Amino acid sequence: MFKLDLKRLGIVAGLSLSLVAAGCGSDEGSEGNNNGDGNSSDGGNSSAAVGEELDYTITGIDAGSGVVGAAKKSIDEYGLEGWEVQTSSGAAMTQALGDAIEDEEPIIVTGWTPHWKFAKYDLKYLEDPNKVFGGEEKIKSMARSGLKDEKPNLYKILDQFNWEASDMESVMLAIENGTPEEEAAKNWIKDNQDKVDEWTKGTDKVDGVEAKIAYVAWASEIASANVIKAVLNEQGFNTEIKQLDNGVMWQAVAEGEADGMVAAWLPGTHGDLYDSYKDQLEDLGANLEGAKIGLVVPSYMEVSSIEDLKGE
């Protein structure tokens, strides 16, 4: 069993709620484009109106995430007096976003891609001229020290795991459509066996070797964790994936309580955590490139830049 020694880790690992399943469709969120005023309640007509209607609040995810840290930094960098980031969870953020869009109300959330919300809704990133959120992100795989010698086949599969944003998003969207997570992963594997063959190339099948993979409760990482679990199980591993808070996920791999993870967003999102633990784990490189973080709004809002949020 994948039992974290929480006392030794020095932090409580509360299980995060799974993301709420909602229907998907690239056309569903486009209704806001017909609202030429930017918002039915004039929320998009001025920075002051947006701030007042939102109570100067940016809806964030978990407090330890890099995107929330960058959002807080952006308040200082852009002189957004009175604004604050309200932390919650990935599920709570997407629920708030969906509720706001349903009523064509303004909302600003901490966002990232790949994520199913960009296929479901018509959204846009606010421009970030000061580059507070950095540039392109990569999602990397990390392994605990000693894994290569102790479980070489597991190590090699994690090292060779590599896919594209469209792959991840297809699994995410299937889950959002109501397909169970494990089934969505297995369906993707059936349709992409050529890619999976590259991940397992040069490895031998095993007989019940334990594989412990940590991940964070984001839609993207729910998808990747379930895909890697299904692949490892096909190779004969007895795989357990454990959903943890951001900091605990990193600490679990660094302390050897987990064998690895495929959920390290760098250099921005998990930058501080990487700096804290990089000497205790092995960086296996990017498994997905072209990721991004920033502040996201519905396209019907007239604001286009973080600078627009500065009241006059």
Image: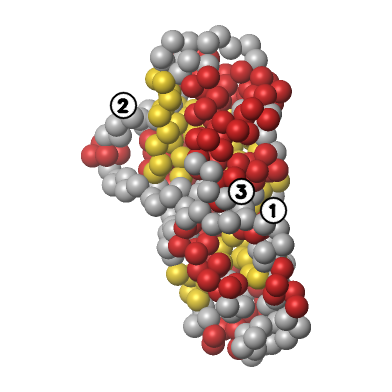
Q: Secondary structure at mark 1?
A: loop
Kind of residue at disc 3:
Leu
Q: Position of residue 289 (x, y in %)?
A: 69, 41
Estimate how packed mark 3 is, as few (under 14), some (14 to 19) or many (20 or more) residues with alpha carbons within 10 Å. Answer: many
Q: Which mark is residue 288?
A: none
Identity, as a three-letter code, of the amino acid under mark 2: Met
Numbered label attached to residue 1: 2
Q: With 59 as the anchor, is 256 left or right in this view?
A: left
Residue sitting at x 40%, y 29%: 240
Q: Earlier in the sequence, mark 3 or mark 2?
A: 2
Mark pair 3, 1: CA separation: 25 Å
Which label belongs to residue 173? 3
Query: How would you rate the neighbour count of disc 2 (Cα within 10 Å): few for under 14, some for 14-19, many for 20 or more?
Result: few
Q: Secondary structure at mark 3?
A: helix
Instruction: Please tell me which residue lies in front, 287 or 220.
Output: 220
Please give the residue where the numbered disc 1 appears in the rendered image: 135
Eyeballing the image, is 12 above or below 89? Answer: above
User: Which of 223 and 266 lies nearest the eye of the viewer?
Assistant: 223
Seen in the picture, residue 230 relative to 40 is either above or below; the reply is above
